[in-house]
Amino acid sequence: MPYPTAAEFRDLLRTRPLEELVQGYIFQGEPFAFRSERRALEVLYRHLHQELNLEPDQLTIVGSAKIGFSVSPESFPRRFSPTSDIDVVAVNEALYDEIWCTILKWHYPRRRRLLDPERTWARYRKDELYWGWIAPDRIRFDVVTLPEILRPIHRLSARWFNAFRSLSRYHHFAGRHISGRLYRTWEHARLYHVDSLRQLAESLHAQAGA
């Protein structure tokens, strides 16, 4: 599909199913950020394959880098610019379940005797797991005990951080912040982005009625 303008997308939110918009404009198609530099997308995907063993069909660009403007309820319709972030969706059930099972191994023997801040740490992890996505590089370990049990997550967190930060060594991505969220399945990713568009549609409707 061609890139819509922000005004056209606003109309689409009123007239088309949100699932269709996510699939057609958010998940599929050539990213706006690489429309004149297609090799950059190949470099990005190859790098993430080498560093995290993620395949191209497990990755997609989202946000303003995909469509040309922000579709976040907080920043719509801010245009993609030379300094805009690039957001990557990564879908890998095995990596996701490795994190999930490791957290369970840590949590099960201690769930009745956790004290803050570990209780808060566990609550955040459960919230992420419920919604089906995790940002591995944002998991902190300085507030939990028994870190040896969590070592598999710590290793993945470091790999994830290094994989995305090291993209800066390519001239295609100089000056940009690139980050990735790990989803368990494409259905989890679809549900998240459909809900985001739902929030945007409701926000625009409220503004129109103000």
Image (cartoon, rainbow, N blue to C red):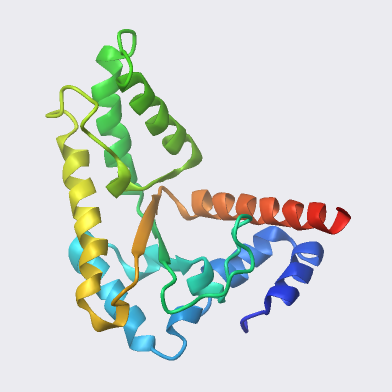
Q: Which residue is painted at 15% across and 28% down in the image? A: 147
Left or right: 5 in relation to 164: right
Q: Nearer the viewer, residue 191 or 78?
A: 78
Residue placed furthest toward the right? 209
User: With respect to residue 152, does 115 lie above or below?
Assistant: above
User: With respect to residue 123, does 32 lie above or below?
Assistant: below
Q: Quadrant of residue 46?
A: bottom left
User: With respect to residue 61, does 108 lie above or below?
Assistant: above
Q: Which residue is painted at 59% across and 66% down in the image? A: 23
**Count of labels shown?**
0
Q: Nearer the viewer, residue 182 or 204?
A: 204
Q: Quadrant of residue 74?
A: bottom right
Q: Position of residue 106 (x, y in %)?
A: 24, 23
Left or right: 113 in relation to 5: left
Q: Which residue is painted at 29% across and 21% down in the image? A: 107
Q: Position of residue 12 (x, y in %)?
A: 75, 69
Left or right: 126 in relation to 201: left
Q: Which residue is painted at 28% across and 49% down in the image? A: 137
Q: Position of residue 48 (x, y in %)?
A: 26, 66
Residue 53 visible, this angle = no
Q: Quadrant of residue 19?
A: bottom right
Q: Position of residue 132 (x, y in %)?
A: 46, 43
User: With respect to residue 32, does 189 lie above or below?
Assistant: above
Residue 108 visible, this angle = yes
Residue placed furthest toward the bottom? 36
Q: Nearer the viewer, residue 16 or 154?
A: 154
Residue placed furthest toward the top? 113
User: Which quadrant: the N terminus?
Assistant: bottom right
Q: Nearer the viewer, residue 87 or 20?
A: 87
